[in-house]
Image (cartoon, rainbow, N blue to C red):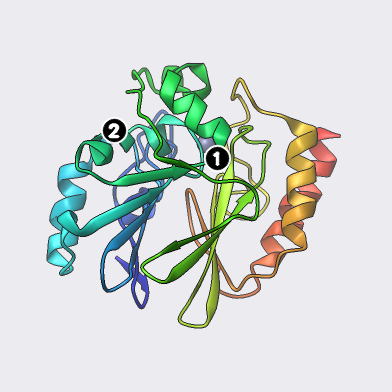
Amino acid sequence: MQLLPGIYQLSGSLAGLGGDQILGPWDECNMYLIDSGSSCILIDAGNGENIDIIFKRMEMWGLDPNKISTLFLTHAHWDHAGGARLFKDRGVKILSSKETADSVASADHRCAGFLYHKEMIPVTVDRIVGDREVVTVDALEFEALHLPGHTLGCMAYLLTFNDQRILFSGDVIGTLGWGDFGWDGSVDFDKQRYIASLFKLQGIPFDVLLPGHGMGSYTDPVKRVNISLNQALIRWR
Ligand SMILES: [Zn+2]
């Protein structure tokens, strides 16, 4: 579904893909697509199991799956990166943090396949991005923000598009709404670094928040960061 002009949500429970009775909405992430006009850029790969439905949807919306050029991974968990290898095999260029690249290459427990009773398929990232590094794709500038905690490799990507600063935040803040955090069982979960990341995110202005699960925020999204920070300080200090 189209969220904003040129920005689509391809998957996730609110898009009708993901969510079973045991795991709730966590087995498939929100994949986002940005239509640059020249190519399609993805935020996260999803778990890979819904790829045929996703491509059919893209075609219904007039988007050509063969025009996907670039995939930014927010982190290595299976529900976000399990499908990365399918895109790699189609010639899509994959970018991530160093820690995420290492996790998905080794496909080890940091990818949390065990949580879903699934095997992570290893994949090689094409370009490693560092904190505050700006990546230009089709004249669009994506700023990478390293926000470790949920995993050590968590990256958010900040894009200015149609005069709005849009933050694709992955699982960094309470992804189901107001102060509710994602899974805190990752082998590389780190409370103190998570709190530091939320303080860091508070200082970065943006207009729209598009998280890794659940609903986006289109007005005053910093409130959601504040609430997550408050919850983190109460629960994790
Ligand atoms: Zn996650």
Q: Residue beneath label 2, please?
A: 85
Query: Would you say the beta carbon of the disc 2 residue lies within 8 angstroms of ligand 1?
Result: no
The quadrant of the picture occupied by the N terminus is: bottom left
Q: In the figure, residue 227 lies in which quadrant?
A: bottom right
Instruction: Give the SS element for disc 1.
Output: loop
Q: Amino acid at mark 1?
A: Ser
Rendering coords of residue 178 (x, y %): 65, 55
Rendering coords of residue 36 (x, y %): 33, 71
Whether residue 35 is situated above or below residue 233 in the rendered picture: below
Q: Which mark is residue 51?
A: none
- Marks 2/1: CA–CA distance: 17 Å
Q: In the figure, residue 23 lies in which quadrant?
A: top left
Rendering coords of residue 210 (x, y %): 50, 60
Rendering coords of residue 102 (x, y %): 50, 26
Q: Is residue 90 left or right of residue 17?
A: left
Instruction: Look at 41% across and 30% down and name the residue there.
Output: 78
The quadrant of the picture occupied by the C terminus is: top right
Give neighbour class at mark 2: few <14, some 14-19, many 20+ (Cα, 10 Å). many
| Mark before the other along the chain sequence, 2 or 1 | 2
Q: Residue beneath label 1, please?
A: 97
Instruction: Look at 63% across and 36% down and name the residue there.
Output: 150
Q: Amino acid at mark 2?
A: Arg
Q: Is residue 45 left or right of residue 144?
A: left
Instruction: Look at 36% across and 78% down and name the residue there.
Output: 5
Residue closest to the eye, 175 or 6 = 6
Instruction: Look at 48% across and 52% down and name the residue there.
Output: 214
Query: Which residue, as the protein is rendered here, is positioned at the far bottom?
Result: 163
Residue closest to the eye, 21 or 37 = 37
Instruction: Give the SS element for disc 2.
Output: helix
Q: Is residue 53 left or right of residue 124?
A: left
